[in-house]
Amino acid sequence: MQVSGCCFAPAARYWRPVAFQLHMRKGFNILGGIVNNTVGQNLYSWDVFVFVNASNNMMKLLRYEPGGLVIYNKRLDHGRMHLV
């Protein structure tokens, strides 16, 4: 998966854990459970886990940083995201 204009380390891997879209109300615990149970990856691996809603206008990135997990949330005012 390509993420342009991203500020994460070049060595970080990007995962889109689920083939289906999620409701964006999900938080740290649910998203972390999806990463562990669906992908089988270590949540604390410094990788970036990408979640997108059904209409492709909202994205959440889940990532471990020093001190704990971080969720980055992006919502487009117009249009849709095109993920490569």
Image: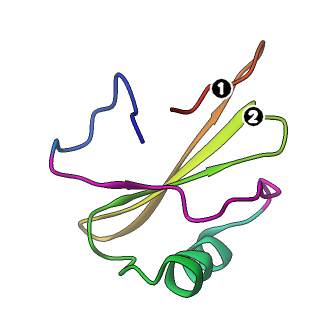
Query: Which amino acid, by three-letter code, is at mark 1?
Result: Met
* Quarter of the image where the N terminus is located: top left
Residue 57 is left or right of residue 8, and the answer is: right
Q: Position of residue 12 (x, y in %)?
A: 23, 52
Quadrant in the rendering for residue 58: top right
Residue 32 badge:
none
Q: Amino acid at mark 2?
A: Asn
According to the picture, the residue beneath numbered tag 2 turns out to be 56
Circle 2 SS class: loop
Q: Residues within 10 Å of mark 1 (few under 14, many from 20)?
A: some
Q: Residue at x 29, y 55 (%)?
A: 13
Q: Does residue 83 show up magenta in the picture? A: no
Q: Is residue 64 left or right of residue 73?
A: left
Q: Is residue 10 above or below residue 12?
A: above
Point out the stretch of residues depicted in magenta.
11-25
Q: Which residue is mark 1?
A: 81
- Kindly state the secondary structure of the residue where label 1 is placed: loop
The answer to whether the residue labelled 2 contacts the one labelled 1, judged by CB atoms less than 8 Å apart, is yes
The spot of residue 79 in percent (x, y) is 76, 14
Depth check: give the residue in front, 39 or 24: 39
12 lies left or right of 69: left
Q: Is residue 21 magenta?
A: yes
